[in-house]
């Protein structure tokens, strides 16, 4: 394996692992809040579960970026990377999803936990409560778009 291929695989690994870490942390934070609410109000399970699952999308986005990268660099198909510069470009293209996925997953978990608190007190405000973590999601989607656009244009 050449150095370019190693850099490309490193980029894919960072996208999947850092975004996945952010999602795991975020889902865990929201899950703690959700468990507390469900212990008092079991009928709110479905609503708080939806709010808990929102931070999980960053991990999916990171996995998508990793699959696209690996399929383009010769690991899952595509043309093998044959030089260091190209490998570094793939690495750089994966970094937006890696770092924004990590940060937004954690912060979306915190925002989801706060929204779960809203639903616990005012079940009728579920729709409004979903907007707060959805705003954090916007930045994960932007990072996903940047990474995909960069990867597909290398």
Image (cartoon, grey):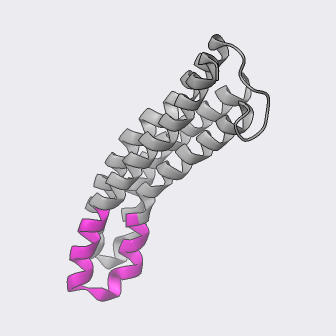
Q: Please identify the quarter of the rendering in which residue 90 is found.
A: top right
Query: How far across and how far down the image is residue 89, in percent?
Result: 61, 18
Q: In this view, does 25 lie to the left or right of 148?
A: left
Point out the stretch of residues depicted in magenta: 30-52
Query: How far across and how far down the image is residue 77, in percent?
Result: 77, 38
Q: Is the magenta stretch mostly helix, strand or loop?
A: helix
What residue is shown at x 39% (from left), y 73% (from top)?
49
Query: How far across and how far down the image is residue 63, in percent?
Result: 56, 47
> Could you tell me which quadrant the N terminus lies in?
top right
What residue is shown at x 36% (from left), y 77% (from top)?
124
What residue is shown at x 43% (from left), y 64% (from top)?
53
With respect to residue 106, does 6 lie above or below? Answer: above
Residue, far bottom: 43
What residue is shown at x 36% (from left), y 73% (from top)?
48
Q: Is residue 141 left or right of residue 33?
A: right
Which sits in the foreground, 24 or 47? 24
**Is residue 6 covered in magenta?**
no
């Amino acid at each position: 394996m050449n150095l370019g291929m190693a850099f490309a695989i490193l980029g894919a690994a960072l996208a999947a692992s850092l975004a996945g870490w952010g999602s795991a942390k975020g889902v865990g934070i929201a899950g703690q809040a959700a468990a507390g609410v469900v212990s008092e109000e079991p009928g709110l399970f479905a609503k708080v579960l939806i709010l808990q699952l929102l931070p999980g999308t960053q991990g999916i986005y990171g996995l998508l970026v990793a699959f696209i990268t690996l399929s383009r660099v010769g690991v899952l198909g595509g043309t093998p990377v044959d030089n260091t510069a190209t490998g570094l470009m793939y690495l750089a293209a994966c970094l937006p999803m890696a770092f924004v996925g990590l940060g937004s997953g954690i912060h979306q978990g915190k925002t989801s936990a706060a929204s779960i608190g809203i639903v616990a007190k005012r079940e009728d405000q579920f729709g409004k409560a979903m907007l707060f973590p959805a705003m954090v999601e916007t930045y994960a989607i932007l990072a996903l778009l940047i990474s995909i656009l960069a990867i597909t244009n290398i």
